[in-house]
Protein backbone atom coordinates (compact mmCIF):
# COMPACT_ATOMS: atom_id res chain seq x y z
CA UNK A 1 0.00 0.00 0.00
CA UNK A 2 1.17 3.51 -0.79
CA UNK A 3 3.61 5.17 1.63
CA UNK A 4 4.23 2.04 3.66
CA UNK A 5 6.58 0.32 1.24
CA UNK A 6 10.24 -0.31 1.90
CA UNK A 7 12.30 2.79 0.97
CA UNK A 8 9.19 5.00 0.66
CA UNK A 9 10.09 8.59 1.69
CA UNK A 10 7.72 9.86 4.39
CA UNK A 11 8.05 13.64 3.99
CA UNK A 12 9.53 14.06 0.53
CA UNK A 13 7.16 14.07 -2.41
CA UNK A 14 6.90 10.84 -4.38
CA UNK A 15 4.17 9.84 -6.83
CA UNK A 16 2.12 6.89 -5.57
CA UNK A 17 3.25 4.82 -8.53
CA UNK A 18 5.48 4.98 -11.57
CA UNK A 19 8.21 7.20 -12.90
CA UNK A 20 8.96 10.82 -11.97
CA UNK A 21 11.81 13.16 -12.85
CA UNK A 22 12.19 16.98 -12.88
CA UNK A 23 9.90 19.28 -10.90
CA UNK A 24 8.06 21.49 -13.41
CA UNK A 25 5.88 24.59 -13.27
CA UNK A 26 6.28 25.17 -9.55
CA UNK A 27 4.08 28.12 -8.72
CA UNK A 28 2.21 29.62 -5.76
CA UNK A 29 -1.36 30.62 -6.60
CA UNK A 30 -4.40 31.45 -4.45
CA UNK A 31 -2.88 30.02 -1.28
CA UNK A 32 -1.71 26.76 -2.89
CA UNK A 33 1.71 25.59 -3.99
CA UNK A 34 1.60 23.67 -7.23
CA UNK A 35 4.17 21.11 -8.22
CA UNK A 36 4.05 19.62 -11.69
CA UNK A 37 6.61 17.03 -12.63
CA UNK A 38 7.96 14.91 -15.44
CA UNK A 39 5.82 11.81 -15.17
CA UNK A 40 5.36 8.53 -17.03
CA UNK A 41 2.13 6.98 -15.75
CA UNK A 42 2.54 3.57 -17.42
CA UNK A 43 5.84 2.32 -16.01
CA UNK A 44 8.50 3.04 -13.43
CA UNK A 45 11.14 3.80 -16.02
CA UNK A 46 11.45 6.98 -18.11
CA UNK A 47 8.98 7.05 -21.04
CA UNK A 48 6.66 9.43 -22.94
CA UNK A 49 6.53 12.41 -20.64
CA UNK A 50 3.41 13.93 -19.08
CA UNK A 51 3.14 16.64 -16.45
CA UNK A 52 2.03 15.02 -13.22
CA UNK A 53 0.54 17.35 -10.61
CA UNK A 54 0.57 17.69 -6.82
CA UNK A 55 -0.61 20.48 -4.52
CA UNK A 56 0.31 21.64 -1.04
CA UNK A 57 -0.49 24.40 1.44
CA UNK A 58 3.04 24.35 2.87
CA UNK A 59 5.45 22.63 0.40
CA UNK A 60 5.82 19.78 2.93
CA UNK A 61 2.57 17.78 2.77
CA UNK A 62 1.73 17.12 -0.87
CA UNK A 63 -1.41 15.69 -2.38
CA UNK A 64 -1.18 14.01 -5.76
CA UNK A 65 -3.68 15.31 -8.33
CA UNK A 66 -4.78 14.06 -11.75
CA UNK A 67 -2.26 14.39 -14.58
CA UNK A 68 -2.18 17.97 -15.91
CA UNK A 69 -0.66 17.67 -19.39
CA UNK A 70 -0.65 14.70 -21.77
CA UNK A 71 1.55 14.15 -24.83
CA UNK A 72 -0.07 15.29 -28.11
CA UNK A 73 0.65 15.51 -31.84
CA UNK A 74 3.56 17.89 -31.19
CA UNK A 75 5.24 15.41 -28.88
CA UNK A 76 5.96 14.54 -25.26
CA UNK A 77 5.61 17.21 -22.59
CA UNK A 78 9.13 17.96 -21.35
CA UNK A 79 10.20 20.29 -18.54
CA UNK A 80 9.16 23.89 -18.14
CA UNK A 81 7.68 26.48 -15.81
CA UNK A 82 4.42 28.20 -14.91
CA UNK A 83 3.53 31.82 -14.18
CA UNK A 84 0.50 33.71 -12.92
CA UNK A 85 -0.52 36.16 -15.67
CA UNK A 86 -1.72 38.92 -13.31
CA UNK A 87 -2.14 41.54 -16.05
CA UNK A 88 -3.72 39.15 -18.53
CA UNK A 89 -0.94 39.86 -21.04
CA UNK A 90 -1.79 36.67 -22.97
CA UNK A 91 -5.51 37.33 -23.03
CA UNK A 92 -6.39 33.95 -21.53
CA UNK A 93 -7.93 35.64 -18.48
CA UNK A 94 -6.82 37.66 -15.47
CA UNK A 95 -4.70 35.59 -13.10
CA UNK A 96 -4.61 32.68 -15.52
CA UNK A 97 -1.95 30.10 -14.78
CA UNK A 98 0.19 29.78 -17.88
CA UNK A 99 2.54 26.83 -18.35
CA UNK A 100 5.49 27.16 -20.73
CA UNK A 101 7.04 23.80 -21.62
CA UNK A 102 9.03 21.92 -24.22
CA UNK A 103 7.32 19.77 -26.81
CA UNK A 104 9.65 16.89 -27.62
CA UNK A 105 8.67 15.16 -30.85
CA UNK A 106 9.90 11.53 -30.84
CA UNK A 107 9.16 11.08 -34.56
CA UNK A 108 11.33 14.01 -35.64
CA UNK A 109 13.93 12.91 -33.11
CA UNK A 110 14.31 9.61 -35.01
CA UNK A 111 14.56 11.48 -38.30
CA UNK A 112 17.40 13.53 -36.79
CA UNK A 113 16.09 16.85 -38.04
CA UNK A 114 17.76 18.55 -35.06
CA UNK A 115 14.51 20.47 -34.65
CA UNK A 116 12.45 18.09 -32.54
CA UNK A 117 12.27 20.31 -29.47
CA UNK A 118 10.05 23.42 -29.49
CA UNK A 119 8.45 25.60 -26.80
CA UNK A 120 4.71 25.67 -26.21
CA UNK A 121 2.19 27.09 -23.77
CA UNK A 122 -1.05 26.01 -22.05
CA UNK A 123 -3.31 27.81 -19.60
CA UNK A 124 -5.59 27.00 -16.71
CA UNK A 125 -8.46 29.11 -15.39
CA UNK A 126 -9.38 26.73 -12.56
CA UNK A 127 -6.31 26.71 -10.30
CA UNK A 128 -4.37 24.18 -12.33
CA UNK A 129 -7.06 21.50 -12.43
CA UNK A 130 -7.63 21.55 -16.18
CA UNK A 131 -5.41 22.91 -18.92
CA UNK A 132 -5.99 24.14 -22.46
CA UNK A 133 -3.10 24.03 -24.87
CA UNK A 134 -2.68 27.15 -27.02
CA UNK A 135 -3.94 26.60 -30.57
CA UNK A 136 -0.91 28.16 -32.21
CA UNK A 137 1.72 26.06 -30.45
CA UNK A 138 4.65 25.97 -30.65
CA UNK A 139 5.44 29.56 -29.65
CA UNK A 140 9.18 29.16 -30.18
CA UNK A 141 10.35 27.16 -33.20
CA UNK A 142 13.64 25.33 -33.13
CA UNK A 143 16.42 26.98 -35.22
CA UNK A 144 18.28 23.64 -35.49
CA UNK A 145 19.68 23.05 -32.00
CA UNK A 146 19.37 19.41 -30.89
CA UNK A 147 18.95 20.17 -27.19
CA UNK A 148 16.56 23.11 -27.00
CA UNK A 149 14.45 22.93 -23.89
CA UNK A 150 13.23 23.59 -20.35
CA UNK A 151 11.91 27.19 -20.58
CA UNK A 152 11.79 29.09 -17.27
CA UNK A 153 9.77 32.29 -17.48
CA UNK A 154 9.59 35.31 -15.17
CA UNK A 155 8.16 38.81 -15.34
CA UNK A 156 10.82 41.53 -15.78
CA UNK A 157 9.19 44.54 -14.17
CA UNK A 158 11.68 47.29 -15.24
CA UNK A 159 10.81 46.68 -18.91
CA UNK A 160 7.34 45.25 -18.34
CA UNK A 161 7.99 42.06 -20.29
CA UNK A 162 8.38 38.35 -19.81
CA UNK A 163 11.87 36.85 -19.92
CA UNK A 164 12.38 33.22 -20.90
CA UNK A 165 15.57 31.36 -20.03
CA UNK A 166 16.18 28.35 -22.24
CA UNK A 167 18.78 25.57 -22.17
CA UNK A 168 20.26 25.34 -25.66
CA UNK A 169 22.86 22.56 -25.91
CA UNK A 170 25.61 23.82 -23.60
CA UNK A 171 24.54 27.45 -23.66
CA UNK A 172 21.67 29.47 -22.26
CA UNK A 173 19.54 31.54 -24.65
CA UNK A 174 17.33 34.38 -23.37
CA UNK A 175 14.08 35.39 -25.06
CA UNK A 176 11.53 38.09 -24.20
CA UNK A 177 7.84 38.63 -24.87
CA UNK A 178 5.03 41.08 -24.11
CA UNK A 179 2.34 38.37 -24.07
CA UNK A 180 3.88 34.88 -23.57
CA UNK A 181 2.99 34.11 -27.20
CA UNK A 182 5.43 36.00 -29.41
CA UNK A 183 9.06 35.66 -28.36
CA UNK A 184 12.20 37.57 -29.41
CA UNK A 185 15.66 36.11 -29.02
CA UNK A 186 17.76 38.46 -26.86
CA UNK A 187 21.16 36.91 -26.19
CA UNK A 188 23.22 33.82 -25.47
CA UNK A 189 25.31 33.00 -22.41
CA UNK A 190 27.92 30.42 -21.56
CA UNK A 191 30.53 30.10 -24.33
CA UNK A 192 33.29 30.81 -21.82
CA UNK A 193 31.60 30.12 -18.52
CA UNK A 194 30.81 27.11 -16.40
CA UNK A 195 31.19 23.40 -16.91
CA UNK A 196 30.77 21.92 -20.39
CA UNK A 197 31.17 18.26 -19.48
CA UNK A 198 27.51 17.62 -20.31
CA UNK A 199 24.35 19.08 -21.76
CA UNK A 200 22.82 22.13 -20.06
CA UNK A 201 19.26 21.63 -18.83
CA UNK A 202 16.61 23.18 -16.60
CA UNK A 203 17.89 26.74 -16.10
CA UNK A 204 16.46 29.45 -13.85
CA UNK A 205 17.04 33.21 -13.57
CA UNK A 206 16.00 35.42 -10.66
CA UNK A 207 17.28 38.31 -8.53
CA UNK A 208 18.10 38.13 -4.82
CA UNK A 209 18.61 41.25 -2.69
CA UNK A 210 22.06 41.26 -1.16
CA UNK A 211 23.64 44.11 0.77
CA UNK A 212 21.09 46.54 -0.65
CA UNK A 213 21.23 45.59 -4.30
CA UNK A 214 19.81 43.00 -6.66
CA UNK A 215 22.17 40.19 -7.62
CA UNK A 216 20.93 38.00 -10.48
CA UNK A 217 21.27 34.27 -10.09
CA UNK A 218 21.44 32.03 -13.16
CA UNK A 219 20.99 28.35 -12.34
CA UNK A 220 22.14 25.89 -14.99
CA UNK A 221 21.68 22.18 -14.40
CA UNK A 222 24.20 19.99 -16.19
CA UNK A 223 24.24 16.29 -17.06
CA UNK A 224 26.75 14.72 -16.74
CA UNK A 225 29.54 16.86 -15.27
CA UNK A 226 28.50 17.20 -11.61
CA UNK A 227 31.16 17.54 -8.87
CA UNK A 228 30.54 13.97 -7.65
CA UNK A 229 29.62 12.56 -11.08
CA UNK A 230 26.41 12.54 -13.05
CA UNK A 231 23.83 15.28 -12.93
CA UNK A 232 24.03 18.40 -10.74
CA UNK A 233 23.18 22.10 -10.58
CA UNK A 234 25.72 24.85 -11.18
CA UNK A 235 24.98 28.56 -10.80
CA UNK A 236 26.35 31.95 -11.76
CA UNK A 237 25.92 35.29 -10.00
CA UNK A 238 25.86 38.54 -11.92
CA UNK A 239 23.70 41.16 -13.62
CA UNK A 240 20.77 40.97 -15.99
CA UNK A 241 19.56 44.01 -17.93
CA UNK A 242 16.54 42.47 -19.63
CA UNK A 243 18.66 41.35 -22.55
CA UNK A 244 22.02 40.01 -21.41
CA UNK A 245 23.26 38.13 -18.36
CA UNK A 246 26.80 38.98 -17.25
CA UNK A 247 28.47 36.67 -14.77
CA UNK A 248 30.74 37.92 -11.99
CA UNK A 249 31.55 34.43 -10.76
CA UNK A 250 35.18 33.45 -11.15
CA UNK A 251 34.72 29.76 -10.41
CA UNK A 252 32.05 27.15 -11.16
CA UNK A 253 29.66 27.10 -8.24
CA UNK A 254 27.36 24.26 -7.23
CA UNK A 255 23.96 24.41 -5.61
CA UNK A 256 24.46 21.06 -3.96
CA UNK A 257 27.52 18.78 -3.85
CA UNK A 258 25.57 15.60 -3.18
CA UNK A 259 24.62 13.38 -6.08
CA UNK A 260 20.87 13.72 -5.65
CA UNK A 261 19.57 17.18 -6.36
CA UNK A 262 18.98 17.64 -10.07
CA UNK A 263 16.82 19.91 -12.23
CA UNK A 264 16.39 22.16 -9.18
CA UNK A 265 14.65 25.45 -9.94
CA UNK A 266 12.58 27.95 -7.96
CA UNK A 267 8.85 28.43 -7.44
CA UNK A 268 7.31 31.41 -9.16
CA UNK A 269 5.05 34.00 -7.53
CA UNK A 270 6.45 33.61 -4.00
CA UNK A 271 7.14 37.33 -3.44
CA UNK A 272 10.44 37.98 -1.66
CA UNK A 273 11.04 34.32 -0.99
CA UNK A 274 13.22 32.33 -3.39
CA UNK A 275 12.34 28.69 -2.87
CA UNK A 276 14.21 25.91 -4.64
CA UNK A 277 13.21 22.29 -5.05
CA UNK A 278 14.95 19.58 -7.03
CA UNK A 279 14.54 16.02 -8.20
CA UNK A 280 16.26 13.82 -5.60
CA UNK A 281 17.97 11.47 -8.01
CA UNK A 282 20.68 11.33 -10.65
CA UNK A 283 20.57 10.22 -14.28
CA UNK A 284 23.47 7.85 -13.46
CA UNK A 285 21.06 5.43 -11.73
CA UNK A 286 17.57 6.99 -11.63
CA UNK A 287 16.11 4.17 -13.76
CA UNK A 288 17.67 1.49 -11.55
CA UNK A 289 16.95 2.55 -7.96
CA UNK A 290 15.35 -0.38 -6.07
CA UNK A 291 11.97 1.22 -5.28
CA UNK A 292 8.58 -0.19 -6.18
CA UNK A 293 5.98 0.69 -7.46
CA UNK A 294 7.36 4.23 -7.94
CA UNK A 295 10.69 5.82 -8.81
CA UNK A 296 12.11 9.08 -7.48
CA UNK A 297 11.37 11.70 -4.84
CA UNK A 298 11.90 15.44 -4.62
CA UNK A 299 14.21 17.26 -2.21
CA UNK A 300 12.87 19.31 0.66
CA UNK A 301 11.96 22.83 -0.47
CA UNK A 302 14.80 25.21 0.37
CA UNK A 303 14.95 28.92 1.01
CA UNK A 304 17.74 30.64 -0.90
CA UNK A 305 19.87 33.62 0.15
CA UNK A 306 23.31 35.02 -0.66
CA UNK A 307 26.36 35.20 1.55
CA UNK A 308 29.73 36.78 0.89
CA UNK A 309 32.85 35.02 2.16
CA UNK A 310 36.04 36.99 1.47
CA UNK A 311 35.87 38.02 -2.21
CA UNK A 312 33.29 35.47 -3.33
CA UNK A 313 29.54 35.44 -2.91
CA UNK A 314 27.63 32.16 -2.69
CA UNK A 315 24.04 30.99 -2.72
CA UNK A 316 22.99 29.48 0.57
CA UNK A 317 20.04 27.15 1.00
CA UNK A 318 18.28 25.94 4.12
CA UNK A 319 15.07 23.94 4.57
CA UNK A 320 11.97 26.13 4.40
CA UNK A 321 10.67 27.04 7.85
CA UNK A 322 7.46 25.14 7.05
CA UNK A 323 9.41 21.93 7.70
CA UNK A 324 9.04 22.70 11.42
CA UNK A 325 5.44 21.52 11.22
CA UNK A 326 6.80 17.96 11.30
CA UNK A 327 8.66 18.41 14.59
CA UNK A 328 7.60 16.07 17.37
CA UNK A 329 9.63 14.95 20.39
CA UNK A 330 13.35 15.37 20.81
CA UNK A 331 16.10 16.50 23.13
CA UNK A 332 18.85 19.09 23.45
CA UNK A 333 22.37 18.87 24.78
CA UNK A 334 24.86 21.58 25.60
CA UNK A 335 28.60 21.46 25.84
CA UNK A 336 29.31 17.73 25.52
CA UNK A 337 32.70 16.19 24.81
CA UNK A 338 32.68 13.52 22.13
CA UNK A 339 35.72 11.34 22.52
CA UNK A 340 35.61 8.31 20.22
CA UNK A 341 31.84 8.05 20.15
CA UNK A 342 28.66 9.61 21.52
CA UNK A 343 25.77 7.22 21.01
CA UNK A 344 22.46 9.06 20.81
CA UNK A 345 20.29 6.04 19.97
CA UNK A 346 18.75 5.61 23.43
CA UNK A 347 18.02 9.29 23.85
CA UNK A 348 16.57 9.58 20.36
CA UNK A 349 14.14 6.68 20.76
CA UNK A 350 13.37 6.85 17.09
CA UNK A 351 12.36 3.71 15.26
CA UNK A 352 11.48 5.44 12.01
CA UNK A 353 14.79 7.12 11.22
CA UNK A 354 12.99 10.38 10.38
CA UNK A 355 14.76 13.24 12.13
CA UNK A 356 16.38 16.62 12.10
CA UNK A 357 19.71 17.15 13.82
CA UNK A 358 21.13 20.62 14.44
CA UNK A 359 24.47 21.00 16.10
CA UNK A 360 27.41 23.31 16.45
CA UNK A 361 31.01 22.42 17.12
CA UNK A 362 34.34 24.25 16.75
CA UNK A 363 36.52 23.53 13.75
CA UNK A 364 39.10 21.58 15.76
CA UNK A 365 39.08 17.96 14.53
CA UNK A 366 37.57 15.38 12.19
CA UNK A 367 34.14 14.11 13.14
CA UNK A 368 31.31 12.09 11.67
CA UNK A 369 27.62 11.52 12.22
CA UNK A 370 26.70 7.88 11.69
CA UNK A 371 23.20 6.68 10.86
CA UNK A 372 22.88 2.94 11.32
CA UNK A 373 20.41 0.07 11.70
CA UNK A 374 20.09 -3.46 13.06
CA UNK A 375 21.20 -4.86 9.72
CA UNK A 376 24.57 -3.15 10.09
CA UNK A 377 24.05 -0.60 7.32
CA UNK A 378 25.81 2.73 7.85
CA UNK A 379 25.44 6.13 6.27
CA UNK A 380 28.24 8.44 7.30
CA UNK A 381 28.15 12.23 7.13
CA UNK A 382 31.43 13.79 8.11
CA UNK A 383 33.99 16.56 8.18
CA UNK A 384 37.64 16.14 7.23
CA UNK A 385 39.58 18.94 8.87
CA UNK A 386 42.88 18.51 7.01
CA UNK A 387 41.12 18.68 3.65
CA UNK A 388 38.55 21.21 4.86
CA UNK A 389 35.83 19.05 3.31
CA UNK A 390 32.49 17.62 4.20
CA UNK A 391 31.53 14.20 2.94
CA UNK A 392 28.76 11.64 2.73
CA UNK A 393 29.79 8.01 2.48
CA UNK A 394 27.04 5.64 1.37
CA UNK A 395 29.29 2.72 0.47
CA UNK A 396 27.86 0.60 3.34
CA UNK A 397 24.40 2.16 3.43
CA UNK A 398 22.37 -0.86 2.32
CA UNK A 399 21.41 -1.78 -1.22
CA UNK A 400 24.05 -0.39 -3.58
CA UNK A 401 24.55 -3.09 -6.21
CA UNK A 402 21.95 -1.83 -8.73
CA UNK A 403 24.57 0.49 -10.26
CA UNK A 404 28.33 0.28 -9.98
CA UNK A 405 29.00 3.90 -9.05
CA UNK A 406 26.26 4.20 -6.45
CA UNK A 407 28.11 3.03 -3.34
CA UNK A 408 30.64 5.83 -3.16
CA UNK A 409 31.87 8.58 -0.89
CA UNK A 410 30.99 12.12 -2.02
CA UNK A 411 32.95 15.18 -1.00
CA UNK A 412 32.25 18.90 -0.79
CA UNK A 413 34.43 21.90 0.02
CA UNK A 414 33.86 23.96 3.13
CA UNK A 415 33.61 27.64 2.17
CA UNK A 416 32.91 29.14 5.59
CA UNK A 417 35.90 30.54 7.49
CA UNK A 418 34.30 30.93 10.92
CA UNK A 419 35.63 28.75 13.72
CA UNK A 420 32.13 27.50 14.49
CA UNK A 421 30.69 24.71 12.35
CA UNK A 422 26.90 24.69 12.48
CA UNK A 423 25.25 21.69 10.80
CA UNK A 424 21.69 20.73 10.02
CA UNK A 425 20.93 17.22 8.88
CA UNK A 426 17.51 16.14 7.62
CA UNK A 427 16.96 12.40 7.41
CA UNK A 428 14.05 10.57 5.81
CA UNK A 429 13.78 6.82 5.19
CA UNK A 430 15.92 6.95 2.07
CA UNK A 431 17.74 10.31 2.03
CA UNK A 432 19.92 12.72 3.96
CA UNK A 433 20.21 16.42 3.28
CA UNK A 434 23.17 18.18 4.87
CA UNK A 435 23.10 21.96 5.31
CA UNK A 436 26.52 22.94 6.64
CA UNK A 437 27.48 26.46 7.71
CA UNK A 438 23.92 27.71 7.44
CA UNK A 439 23.57 26.38 3.91
CA UNK A 440 26.90 27.48 2.39
CA UNK A 441 27.76 23.85 1.64
CA UNK A 442 24.85 21.54 0.87
CA UNK A 443 24.85 17.82 0.12
CA UNK A 444 21.86 15.65 -0.75
CA UNK A 445 22.26 11.88 -1.04
CA UNK A 446 19.75 9.07 -1.34
CA UNK A 447 20.34 5.56 0.00
CA UNK A 448 18.43 2.30 0.46
CA UNK A 449 18.92 0.73 3.92
CA UNK A 450 17.62 -2.76 4.68
CA UNK A 451 15.65 -1.38 7.64
CA UNK A 452 15.12 2.13 9.07
CA UNK A 453 18.22 3.93 10.30
CA UNK A 454 17.12 3.92 13.93
CA UNK A 455 20.60 4.34 15.42
CA UNK A 456 22.59 7.54 15.59
CA UNK A 457 26.00 8.40 16.91
CA UNK A 458 28.59 11.14 16.62
CA UNK A 459 32.17 9.99 16.32
CA UNK A 460 35.52 11.74 16.58
CA UNK A 461 38.81 9.93 17.03
CA UNK A 462 40.74 12.89 18.43
CA UNK A 463 37.67 14.38 20.09
CA UNK A 464 35.41 17.40 19.59
CA UNK A 465 33.26 19.49 21.84
CA UNK A 466 29.64 19.73 20.74
CA UNK A 467 28.58 23.16 21.92
CA UNK A 468 24.91 22.80 21.15
CA UNK A 469 22.85 19.93 19.88
CA UNK A 470 19.17 19.62 19.11
CA UNK A 471 17.60 16.38 17.93
CA UNK A 472 14.02 16.34 16.69
CA UNK A 473 11.98 13.35 15.61
CA UNK A 474 10.01 14.26 12.49
CA UNK A 475 6.64 12.83 11.64
CA UNK A 476 5.54 11.76 8.15
CA UNK A 477 3.82 14.39 6.02
CA UNK A 478 2.43 11.93 3.49
CA UNK A 479 0.13 9.03 4.27
C1 LIG B 1 16.33 16.90 -17.19
C2 LIG B 1 15.61 16.56 -18.47
C3 LIG B 1 15.14 17.82 -19.16
C4 LIG B 1 13.99 17.32 -20.00
C5 LIG B 1 13.39 16.25 -19.13
C6 LIG B 1 12.85 15.08 -19.87
O1 LIG B 1 16.34 15.89 -16.25
O2 LIG B 1 16.45 15.79 -19.30
O3 LIG B 1 16.14 18.48 -19.89
O4 LIG B 1 13.09 18.36 -20.30
O5 LIG B 1 14.41 15.83 -18.24
O6 LIG B 1 12.15 14.23 -19.04
Image: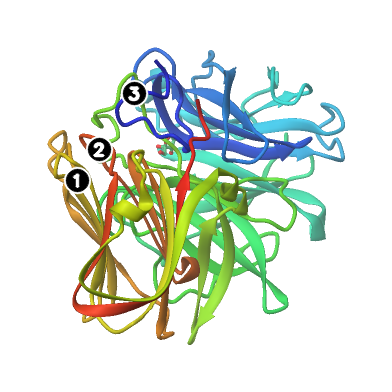
Residue at numbered disc 2 = 448
Q: Is residue 474 left or right of residue 370?
A: right
- Residues 375 and 384: in front is 375
Residue at numbered disc 1 = 397
Quadrant for ligand 1 reads top left
- The residues bearing labels 3 and 2 have C-alpha atoms spaced at a distance of 12 Å
- Residues 313 and 381: in front is 381
Is residue 283 among what the camera can see?
Answer: yes
Is residue 201 among what the camera can see?
Answer: no
Q: Residue 66: x percent and y percent?
A: 59, 16
Secondary structure under badge 1?
loop
Tag 1 and tag 2, C-beta contact below 8 Å? yes
Q: Residue 246: x percent and y percent?
A: 57, 69
Residue drawn at x 41%, y 35% as measured from the top left: 297
> Looking at the rendered structure, which numbered label has been put on residue 5?
3
Disc 1 residue crowd, few under 14, some 14–19, many 20+, Cα 10 Å: many
Residue drawn at x 42%, y 49% as measured from the top left: 355
Q: Would you identify the image quadrant in which residue 362 lies?
A: bottom left
Secondary structure under badge 2?
loop
Amino acid sequence: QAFKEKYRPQFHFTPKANWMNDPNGMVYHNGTYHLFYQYYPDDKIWGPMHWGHATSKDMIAWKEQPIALYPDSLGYIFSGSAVVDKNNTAGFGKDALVAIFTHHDPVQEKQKTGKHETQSIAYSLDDGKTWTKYKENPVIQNPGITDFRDPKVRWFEPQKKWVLTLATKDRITFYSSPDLKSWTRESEFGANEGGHGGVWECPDLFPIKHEGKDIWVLIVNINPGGPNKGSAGQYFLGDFDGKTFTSNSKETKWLDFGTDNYAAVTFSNTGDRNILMGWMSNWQYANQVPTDPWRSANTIARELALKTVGKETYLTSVPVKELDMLNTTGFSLKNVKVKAQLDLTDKAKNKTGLFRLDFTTKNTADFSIVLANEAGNELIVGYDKAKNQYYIDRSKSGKIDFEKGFGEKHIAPRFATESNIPLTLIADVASVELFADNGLTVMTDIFFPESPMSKLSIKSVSGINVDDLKYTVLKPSME
